[in-house]
Image (cartoon, grey):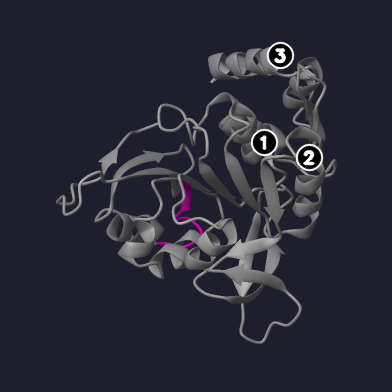
Amino acid sequence: MYLKSVLQMGSLMLHFRNGATLVQQMRAAEPSDAIVLWDGTRIAHPAQRAGLLEAVQEIWLEHVYTGGFYRPADGDVIVDAGANIGLFAIYVARQNPRCRVIALEPFAENFQYLQANVARACPKNVTCHEVALGAGFGQGQMQAMGSRSLDHVLRCDANIGGGIAVIPLSGLLDLARAEEIDFLKVDIEGSEHDVFAAASPQLLSRCKRIAMEYHDRLVPGTLELLRSVLSPTHELTIRPSQMAGCGILLARRRSAAGERPTKASTIQS
């Protein structure tokens, strides 16, 4: 654990202009309100909320969604569902300015930061939408589950009026104006269960690669459901995290039609 902390601090110093400040905040367990890239671009975060350094570690330093799995190519359509303040959308958009990124974030405070951060970092190839993914079209409300900017869950109710727009996976393809999605990143705090339960194999096969954080601890049975619905169309790799009941699922579309499903592999973290 000590060695991991040292490596994390060294990575912060290496990757960010304000790395020394980030290290101090990490050691003091204090919230961070921004990271500053070496070109001076500032990616801001709600000052009163925790979560920035954890997300930076996962997305920018450990590459939990993309490492050894995906790198954006010219013309790729990438969707970031659960974009938060834009860390992943900005990270992948700056890797290749000729890809197109659609970022979805339903929590109002995070969405304001997402829009501002994208405007500073990569306005030409990222578009932002204040919508949530769900089982179908409708309205929902976001409920805070903790003090971090990461901990908000979607509550859907047919009687909700004036809430956040909710769209299913089919609506996401329409929103992206694409026949296929080259890379779909999903971190939606348990809503992944209903989203993928409602999706047909034909619809799922239009996503070439999926990288998703699953949340069995929030919605028990989520991982088993994801295995069941995705394995006919995709090859799966499961990477459990150190926190019980969650981890990363990577899904790569099968190259040959009619290929028999194989058992998902599991990589222990």
Residue 96 picture location, percent across and down: 59, 29
- When the figure is inspected, residue 178 is found, relative to residue 121, above or below; the finding is below
Residue range highlighted in magenta: 211-220
Residues under numbered marks 1 and 2 in contact, where contact means CB atoms less than 8 Å apart: yes
Q: Quadrant of the C terminus?
A: top left
Q: Which is in the foreground here, disc 3 or disc 2? A: 2
- When the figure is inspected, residue 45 is found, relative to residue 154, above or below; the finding is above
Task: Kindly indicate the quadrant of the structure image that contains residue 3.
Answer: top right
CA neighbours of label 3 inside 10 A, class few (<14), some (14 to 19), many (20+): some
Give the residue type at disc 3: Met
Give the residue type at disc 2: Asn
CA neighbours of label 2 inside 10 A, class few (<14), some (14 to 19), many (20+): many
Q: Report whether residue 191 is seen.
A: no
Q: Tell me the distance, in whole angstroms, between the alpha carbons under discs 3 and 2.
A: 21 Å
Q: Tell me the distance, in whole angstroms, between the alpha carbons under discs 1 and 2.
A: 8 Å
Q: Badge 2 is on which residue?
A: 117
Residue 23 picture location, percent across and down: 74, 19
Q: Which mark is residue 90?
A: 1
Q: Badge 3 is on which residue?
A: 13
Left or right of 31, for residue 158: left
Left or right of 55, for residue 181: left
N-terminal of the pair, mark 1 or mark 2, is 1
Q: Tell me the distance, in whole angstroms, between the alpha carbons under discs 1 and 3.
A: 19 Å
Left or right of 252, for residue 152: right
What residue appears at the point 71 percent right and 13 percent down from the top-left corner? 13
- When the figure is inspected, residue 223 is found, relative to residue 97, above or below; the finding is below
N-terminal of the pair, mark 1 or mark 3, is 3
Q: Which mark is residue 167?
A: none
Task: Kindly indicate the quadrant of the structure image that contains residue 45.
Answer: top right
